[in-house]
Amino acid sequence: MPYLGIDHIDLRVPALGAVEAFYDALFQRLGLTRRKYSRVETGGAAWEDATEADYNAVEWYEDDVQGRAALFFGVIEEEGAQPARGRIAFAVTADSLDDWERVLPTLGAREIERNQEAWYPAIFFTDPLGTRLEVCARLPRP
């Protein structure tokens, strides 16, 4: 079976209000411009559409996608959730890294560190609650 990529990511956070504006700004820059509000039970067993007045999850989707399902990233408030100890990496172009380095602090990113290795152009950072993220422009293997 071929690997077709990642369909979506659901990230659990202890306080959606502490990171929602950060992710909204980050995902707007990455091209995930459509928002959807939901109510999600702990563990994700029940999922239903919600309104902006009553929700505990936001999903940011690609817009105007044709011929395939739109990719999305969901952030869900769940009591007791801890910041992700792994790292979620977003692919960007190499010529955009200087701009990302300049903009990330204005979005609310913390612990921003540019990787200095030429073979792995990336910027590592955390969201306001400590989830590890990066933007990277990996080069193709020779």
Image (spheres, rainbow, N blue to C red):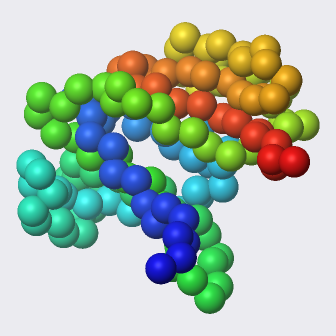
Q: Quadrant of residue 116?
A: top right
Q: Which of the 4 quarters of the picture holds residue 137?
A: top right
Q: In this picture, is 129 found above or below 134?
A: above
Name the foreground residue: 116 vs 35.
Answer: 116
Considering only vertical position in the picture, is 37 above or below 88? below
Q: Residue pushed farthest bottom?
A: 67
Nearest the viewer among 3 and 122 is 3
Q: Position of residue 56 (x, y in %)?
A: 22, 48
Mark count: 0
Residue 7, horizontal then vertical, whole percent: 46, 66
Name the residue: 27% across, 46% down. 76
Q: Is residue 103 visible?
A: no
Task: Give percent across and percent down for residue 112.
Answer: 62, 14
Q: Quadrant location of residue 136?
A: top right
Give the residue drawn at x 53%, y 76%.
2
Q: For the view shown, which residue lies furthest in the front direction? A: 142
Task: Establish if 56 lies above or below 89.
Answer: below
Residue shown at the point (32%, 59%) measured from the top left? 37
The residue sitting at 57% across, 39% down in the picture is 89
Query: Where in the figure is residue 21, as x and y percent of width and height?
Result: 47, 35
